[in-house]
Amino acid sequence: GSFHTSHEYATVRWQVEEGQHALAGASCESVRDKQVFFLEPGESWEIRNTGDTVYRQITFELKRPPRRTEAEVAALLRSAIYSTDVGTELLLENRWCRVWDFSFLPGGGADEDVHHHVLDYVFVFAYPGRLLLSNHDGSPGLADSINGENDVTWNEIPDGAASIPTF
Protein backbone atom coordinates (compact mmCIF):
# COMPACT_ATOMS: atom_id res chain seq x y z
CA GLY A 1 0.00 0.00 0.00
CA SER A 2 0.89 3.62 -0.20
CA PHE A 3 0.24 6.78 1.79
CA HIS A 4 -1.31 9.81 0.10
CA THR A 5 -1.96 13.25 1.52
CA SER A 6 -2.60 16.70 0.15
CA HIS A 7 -1.00 19.44 2.22
CA GLU A 8 -3.14 22.48 2.93
CA TYR A 9 -0.14 24.22 4.52
CA ALA A 10 3.54 24.55 3.67
CA THR A 11 5.05 21.32 5.00
CA VAL A 12 8.49 20.09 5.99
CA ARG A 13 9.07 16.32 5.94
CA TRP A 14 12.28 15.25 7.72
CA GLN A 15 13.60 11.72 7.21
CA VAL A 16 14.64 9.85 10.39
CA GLU A 17 17.20 7.16 9.58
CA GLU A 18 17.93 5.85 6.10
CA GLY A 19 15.11 4.37 4.08
CA GLN A 20 13.80 3.69 0.64
CA HIS A 21 10.67 5.07 -0.92
CA ALA A 22 8.87 5.57 -4.17
CA LEU A 23 7.07 8.85 -4.63
CA ALA A 24 3.94 8.94 -6.79
CA GLY A 25 4.77 7.66 -10.26
CA ALA A 26 8.50 7.36 -9.55
CA SER A 27 10.83 4.42 -9.11
CA CYS A 28 12.38 3.30 -5.84
CA GLU A 29 15.07 5.59 -4.43
CA SER A 30 17.22 5.68 -1.32
CA VAL A 31 16.49 8.37 1.24
CA ARG A 32 19.34 9.43 3.48
CA ASP A 33 19.00 10.05 7.19
CA LYS A 34 18.09 13.72 7.83
CA GLN A 35 17.04 14.33 4.23
CA VAL A 36 14.47 17.12 4.16
CA PHE A 37 11.59 17.54 1.73
CA PHE A 38 9.56 20.75 1.42
CA LEU A 39 6.04 20.98 0.01
CA GLU A 40 4.31 24.24 -0.86
CA PRO A 41 0.67 24.69 0.23
CA GLY A 42 -1.62 22.56 -1.93
CA GLU A 43 1.06 20.06 -3.00
CA SER A 44 0.35 16.35 -2.64
CA TRP A 45 2.60 13.64 -1.26
CA GLU A 46 2.12 10.00 -2.17
CA ILE A 47 4.68 7.57 -0.90
CA ARG A 48 5.31 3.85 -0.68
CA ASN A 49 7.92 2.30 1.63
CA THR A 50 10.00 0.10 -0.66
CA GLY A 51 12.61 -0.82 1.96
CA ASP A 52 12.94 -3.59 4.51
CA THR A 53 12.78 -1.33 7.60
CA VAL A 54 10.37 1.09 9.18
CA TYR A 55 10.11 4.32 7.21
CA ARG A 56 9.94 7.29 9.57
CA GLN A 57 9.58 11.01 8.93
CA ILE A 58 8.85 13.94 11.20
CA THR A 59 6.33 16.25 9.56
CA PHE A 60 5.82 19.96 10.28
CA GLU A 61 2.89 21.94 8.93
CA LEU A 62 3.63 25.67 8.84
CA LYS A 63 0.14 26.97 9.53
CA ARG A 64 0.84 30.67 9.14
CA PRO A 65 2.76 32.64 6.57
CA PRO A 66 6.28 33.74 7.47
CA ARG A 67 6.24 36.57 10.05
CA ARG A 68 9.08 38.37 8.30
CA THR A 69 10.16 39.05 4.75
CA GLU A 70 13.36 37.48 3.44
CA ALA A 71 15.05 40.89 3.69
CA GLU A 72 13.99 41.23 7.35
CA VAL A 73 15.31 37.74 8.12
CA ALA A 74 18.63 38.54 6.44
CA ALA A 75 18.92 41.76 8.48
CA LEU A 76 18.21 39.90 11.74
CA LEU A 77 20.81 37.25 10.93
CA ARG A 78 23.41 39.95 10.16
CA SER A 79 22.65 41.91 13.34
CA ALA A 80 22.99 39.03 15.83
CA ILE A 81 25.72 39.34 18.45
CA TYR A 82 26.82 35.71 18.07
CA SER A 83 26.69 33.16 15.26
CA THR A 84 23.20 32.30 14.07
CA ASP A 85 24.35 28.79 13.20
CA VAL A 86 22.02 27.27 15.77
CA GLY A 87 22.74 23.66 14.85
CA THR A 88 25.43 21.42 13.47
CA GLU A 89 24.20 21.44 9.85
CA LEU A 90 21.76 23.62 7.90
CA LEU A 91 19.59 21.12 5.99
CA LEU A 92 17.07 23.45 4.30
CA GLU A 93 16.52 27.17 3.99
CA ASN A 94 13.74 28.93 2.14
CA ARG A 95 11.32 31.82 2.63
CA TRP A 96 9.27 29.71 5.08
CA CYS A 97 11.86 28.22 7.39
CA ARG A 98 15.41 27.16 8.16
CA VAL A 99 15.85 23.50 9.14
CA TRP A 100 18.92 22.70 11.23
CA ASP A 101 20.19 19.37 12.45
CA PHE A 102 21.52 19.43 15.97
CA SER A 103 23.51 16.27 16.65
CA PHE A 104 26.30 15.56 19.10
CA LEU A 105 27.90 12.32 20.15
CA PRO A 106 27.60 11.67 23.91
CA GLY A 107 29.71 14.29 25.69
CA GLY A 108 30.01 16.34 22.49
CA GLY A 109 29.67 20.08 22.14
CA ALA A 110 31.59 22.76 23.97
CA ASP A 111 30.63 25.57 26.32
CA GLU A 112 32.25 28.09 23.98
CA ASP A 113 30.04 27.04 21.03
CA VAL A 114 27.71 30.01 21.48
CA HIS A 115 24.88 30.69 19.07
CA HIS A 116 22.14 33.29 18.89
CA HIS A 117 18.43 32.82 18.24
CA VAL A 118 16.85 35.69 16.32
CA LEU A 119 13.96 33.72 14.78
CA ASP A 120 11.23 31.57 16.30
CA TYR A 121 12.17 27.91 16.45
CA VAL A 122 10.95 24.43 17.23
CA PHE A 123 13.13 21.76 18.80
CA VAL A 124 12.28 18.11 18.12
CA PHE A 125 14.02 15.20 19.79
CA ALA A 126 14.04 12.33 17.30
CA TYR A 127 15.62 10.20 20.06
CA PRO A 128 15.78 10.43 23.84
CA GLY A 129 18.56 12.64 25.12
CA ARG A 130 19.85 15.17 27.55
CA LEU A 131 20.89 18.67 26.53
CA LEU A 132 23.01 20.82 28.83
CA LEU A 133 23.01 24.44 27.75
CA SER A 134 25.59 27.04 28.75
CA ASN A 135 25.15 30.78 29.12
CA HIS A 136 26.43 33.16 26.43
CA ASP A 137 29.62 33.73 28.47
CA GLY A 138 30.41 29.99 28.46
CA SER A 139 29.37 29.39 32.06
CA PRO A 140 27.15 26.34 32.62
CA GLY A 141 23.61 26.42 33.89
CA LEU A 142 21.35 27.97 31.25
CA ALA A 143 19.28 24.78 30.97
CA ASP A 144 19.35 21.07 31.67
CA SER A 145 16.81 19.43 29.39
CA ILE A 146 16.05 15.73 29.56
CA ASN A 147 13.80 14.73 26.69
CA GLY A 148 12.14 11.62 25.35
CA GLU A 149 11.77 10.47 21.78
CA ASN A 150 9.46 12.79 19.81
CA ASP A 151 9.40 15.52 22.48
CA VAL A 152 8.76 18.93 20.90
CA THR A 153 9.24 22.48 22.20
CA TRP A 154 8.26 25.71 20.44
CA ASN A 155 10.12 28.92 21.23
CA GLU A 156 8.88 32.29 20.07
CA ILE A 157 11.72 34.81 19.91
CA PRO A 158 10.74 38.43 20.65
CA ASP A 159 11.52 41.38 18.45
CA GLY A 160 14.84 42.88 19.47
CA ALA A 161 16.38 39.53 20.44
CA ALA A 162 19.30 40.11 18.06
CA SER A 163 20.71 42.67 20.52
CA ILE A 164 20.10 40.55 23.65
CA PRO A 165 22.92 38.08 24.37
CA THR A 166 20.72 35.60 26.27
CA PHE A 167 18.84 34.58 23.12
Image (tube, grey):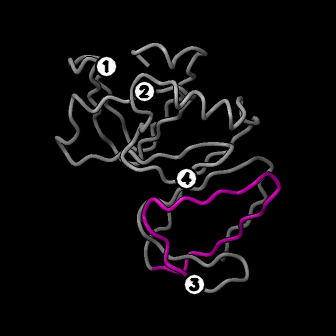
Identify the residue at horizontal 49%, vertical 72% (top origin). Answer: 31
Residue range of the region highlighted in magenta in the rendering: 28-51
Q: Quadrant of residue 18?
A: bottom left
Circle 4 packing at 10 Å, graded few (<14), some (14-19), many (20+), is some
Which residue in the structure is indicated by mark 1?
136
Residue depth check, mark 4 versus mark 3: number of the one nearer the observer = 4
Please determine whether, in this image, residue 80 is positioned above or below residue 45: above
Alpha-carbon span between mark 4 and mark 1: 26 Å
Which residue in the structure is indicated by mark 3?
28
Please determine whether, in this image, residue 23 is positioned above or below residue 57: below
Q: Earlier in the sequence, mark 4 or mark 3?
A: 3
Residue 147's spot in the image, x, y percent?
A: 35, 34
Which residue in the structure is indicated by mark 2?
116
Of all residues, the one furthest to the left in this rendering is 107
- At label 3, the amino acid type is Cys
Which residue in the structure is indicated by mark 4?
92
